[in-house]
Image (spheres, rainbow, N blue to C red):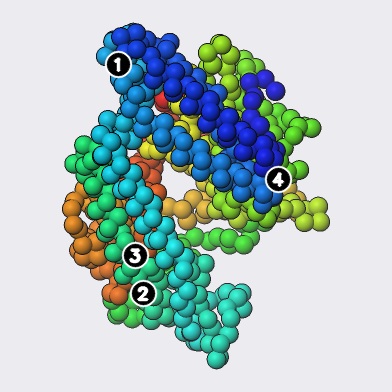
Amino acid sequence: LPGFSVQVNLSAAEIKRLADRIIAKSKETYDAVAAVPLDKVNFANAIAPLAELDAQQFPLVQACVLPRMVSPSEDICRASAEAEKRLDSHFLLCRQREDVYRVVKAFTERGERIGPEATRFVQYLVREFERNGAKLTQTKKKEMEKLKSLIDDLNLKYIQNMNDFTKFLLLSEEELAGMPLEFLKDLEETDGKRKVLLTGYYVTPILEHCKVGSTRKQIAVAYGQKGGNQNVAILEKLVQIRHRLARLLGYSNYSDFAIEPRMPMTSRKVLEFLEEMSEQLSDLANRELTVLKELKMKEEGDAQFGMEDLLYYMKRGEQHKVDLDIGEIKRYFPVKLVISGMLKMFQDLFALRFEEIKDVEVWHDTVRLFSVWDASSSDLLGYFFLDIFSREGKYDHTCVVALQNGCMCSNGSRKVPVAVLLSQCPKEFDGNSALLRFPEVVRIFHEFSHVVHHISNRATFSRFSSLRLEGDFAEIPSLLLENWCYESISLKMMSGFYQDITKSVSTEACQSLKRRRDMFAGLKLKQEILLCLVDQIIHTSENVDIDELIKDLHPKVILGIPLLEGTSPASCFPRIAVGYDAVCYSYIWSEVFAADLFATKFKDDLLNQHAGLRFRNKVLNEMMLF
C-alpha cells in the first residue's frame, strides 16, 4: 500500500530478529553522529541522521510492540513484551550518550539557519539528552540510574499492595437496602450475609445506590484504606527520591522537572491554574451541594453530610432531574451502527473520505483496515485499523496505538500516518449486532478522535506526529470532539433501535444525556482539583506529611466537607504514585482548552465543514510547533 510500511503478523522469532536489527541500526547511526568532528557539524551530518532514524524505525518498533496487545499466541505476546523491554532499555542508553549530545549541542552553537520545525526538533533533542542525564558526570549518572531503579521498584510495590488487597465486608440484605436484585445475586452468601469484596466493581454501585448511610460509610472507610500505611510510606519515599532525581538534573523540585516540557512550563503556573479553577467553581459547587443536602434531609433527617453521601445523592439528584432509562438507551446503540455513524460524522465534519480495504493481511479476522483521503483533493492522508471486538488475551482497554508516524524521509518520499483503534466491544450474537452502553459510545468516539488527529497531522519530523505531542495538548482535540456525543444531530447519526434501525434515539433522550453529563459538574471537578493540588504540593515541597496535607486541604476545597475519618487517600492514589506524578492537572487543563474551542468555534453549528477544515488544518496539523 502507498506510504505504508507497517508489518503485522510477525512470529515470535521474527520479532526477536527485528528487535536485533533495530538496535544494531540505532547503534550504527548514533556512533556515526558521535564520530562527527565538532568543528565540522552541520544539519546533514548531525541532525538529519537522527531524524531519519526515528522516521524509519518507529513503525518497526511498533511492529515489535503491538503483538503484546493483540496476538492470541502466548509465545508471540511473550516475545513482544521481551522485545519492548530490550528496546526501551536500548533507547534510554541512546538518550544518555554524552558523545552524541556534544555533537548536537555543537550544532546549536553554529547558528546554521533552518526552518521552524527543524529548530523545534533540535531543541527537543537537546532537552531529551539533558533530561536523561547526558550532561552528568559518570558518578552522577550512576546515581541517577540508582534513583530510577528505586522509583521503579517502589512503583511496583505500591501497585502490588493495591492489587493484593483482599479485604471484604459481610453485610446483611437489610444493610444493603436499595441495591438491585442483580447486584445481590452476584454476591457470595456466607452465614446469611453477603460477601462484598472491596473492589471498585462492588464499592461504586453501593456508594451510588445503597439507602443505608451507615453502610455507605462503612464501605467508604474500608475502601479508603486500600494499600494501608505501607503505601503511604511508599508514596512519601517516592516523592523524596523524585526530588533527589530532579535536583541531580538541576531543578529545584520534581514538579518543575516534570512540567518543564509541558504547556504551563512551571509548577507555579499549575498551582495558579488549579487555585483559580477551584475558586471559580465554588459558587456552582455550593449550589449543587445545597441540593444534595436537601435531598439527604428529606431522606435521612438532620444528619451531617459526609463524603460517603456524595455519590448516592448525586445519583438521587440525577433521578429527580433527568428522565432517562440507561437500559433503554443502550438498545439504540448497536455496535455496527455506532461505528458507521461515527465514521460518517468525521468524514462530513473534516472533509475526509474513508475507504475500507479488503483482502489484506491482518492479525485477526475481525480487524478492518481503512484508507483515509482528503475529500476535495483526493490526496491519501493515511490508514487506520479497527480492532474493536473482544477476544481472549487482547488488551483490555479502549485506546489508540500509532503504528506509523506521518513524516518526510531523506529520499523525499513521505510516510503516511497509520493507527489502530483497540476496544473490547461485545461480538454479534445470532447475527444481531451487540449493543453498547452509552459510556462505551463516548469512549470509542473519544479514541477515534485521536485516530483522526493522528492522520490529519502533516509533520515533517516523525517526532511531531500527533500522538507524540506534549500530553497537555494531545487530549484537547478528543475532549473537544466528545461534545458531539451529547448533541442530537450527531447522536442521531450514530443510533438506531436495535429492532428497527430507522428509529434513532429521541431528541428528548439526547437532551437528557446532556443534562446528566452536566449535573453536579462543579462538585465532580472540585474532587479532581483536590487530587491535583495534593499532587502539585507534594512534588514541589520537601518532607510533606501527605495524610495531614489531605486532611487540611479537603474541607478547604470540598466546601467544608471533612476528609472521611479513618480513610487514608494517600494509600490508594495510583495516579500520583505511578504515571501521572506531578502532572495530574493535565486532564483538567485540556478540558478547559477544549471547552473554549467548542464554545467559540463549533457550538452553534456542529457539522460546519468550514470550521472543521480550519480545525483540521490549523490545529490538528500545525500543533507540532507549539
Q: Do the residues labelled 4 and 2 touch (CB within 8 Å)?
A: no
Snapshot quadrant of residue 387: top right
User: Mark 2: few, some, or many residues within 10 Å (few <14, many ≥20)?
Assistant: some
Find residue 145 and report its horizontal and vertical position in percent. Answer: 33, 44
Q: Mark 1 points at which residue?
A: 106
Mark 1 vs mark 2: which is more N-terminal?
A: 1
Q: Name the residue under label 2.
A: 221
| Numbered mark located on residue 336 in the image | 4
Quadrant in which the C terminus is drawn: top left
Quadrant in which the N terminus is drawn: top right
Q: Residue at x 19, y 51 (%)?
A: 541
Find residue 75 and report its horizontal and vertical position in percent. Answer: 67, 49
Between 341 and 142, the one nearer to me in the picture: 142
> Is residue 368 at least partly visible in the picture?
no
Give the residue type that dot 4 points to. Lys
Q: Mark 3 points at which residue?
A: 231
Q: Image height check: is 32 above or below 138?
A: above
Closer to us: mark 4 or mark 2? 2
Q: Image height check: is 58 above or below 497?
A: above
Q: What element carries label 2?
A: helix
